[in-house]
Amino acid sequence: MLKRAPWLLALFSISALAQNVTEVRIENYKYEPAEVTIKAGDTVRWVNREKRTSHSVVFPKEGGLESERMFPDESWPRRFDKAGRYEYHCGPHPEMKGSIVVE
Ligand SMILES: [Cu+2]
């Protein structure tokens, strides 16, 4: 097992490099930036930078698919494989809105 560890580490590093990760900060009850454009296969990672408030990300057009609740300094990644426009809002604060454009 120990001998295999470096190989596993190398594989993880390669797969991490193969895709782009775009970060969306959540701060002051806003997604920042509120709209991002990425390429199919890329990942968006939402990061909660609040001091106390928890947030989530809900995609109403996908049956209300919702992220885990993100507490301060937690994050949630989602990979987007299909082109399109993905509108989302926050579960506990529906007035918070954002969108991901996948090219
Ligand atoms: Cu929220």
Image: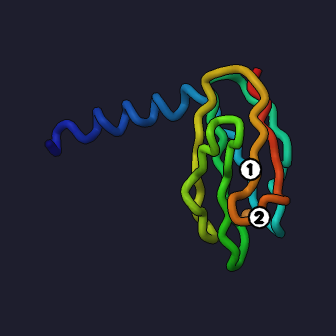
Near mark 2 (Cα within 10 A), the count class, few <14, some 14-19 or many ≥20, is some
Q: Is residue 84 left or right of residue 77?
A: right
Where, by quadrant of the figure, is residue 55 drawn?
Answer: bottom right
Ligand 1 neighbours mark 2 (CB distance < 8 Å): yes
Of residues 66 and 3, which is closer to you in this image? 66
In the image, residue 50 above or below residue 42? below
Q: Is residue 102 left or right of residue 41?
A: right
Ligand 1: quadrant of the figure: bottom right
Where, by quadrant of the figure, is residue 44 drawn?
Answer: top right
Q: Which residue is at a point 83% across and 51% down the rendered structure image?
A: 97
Near mark 1 (Cα within 10 A), the count class, few <14, some 14-19 or many ≥20, is many
Label 1: element kind? strand
Where, by quadrant of the figure, is residue 8 drawn?
Answer: top left
Lower position in the chain sequence, tag 1 or tag 2? 1
Q: Position of residue 9 (x, y in %)?
A: 35, 39
Q: Position of residue 69 (x, y in %)?
A: 58, 62
- Please tell me how many numbered marks the rendered image carries: 2
In the drawing, what numbered circle is on residue 24? 1
Label 2: element kind? loop
Viewport quadrant of the N terminus: top left
Of residues 98 and 65, which is closer to you in this image? 65
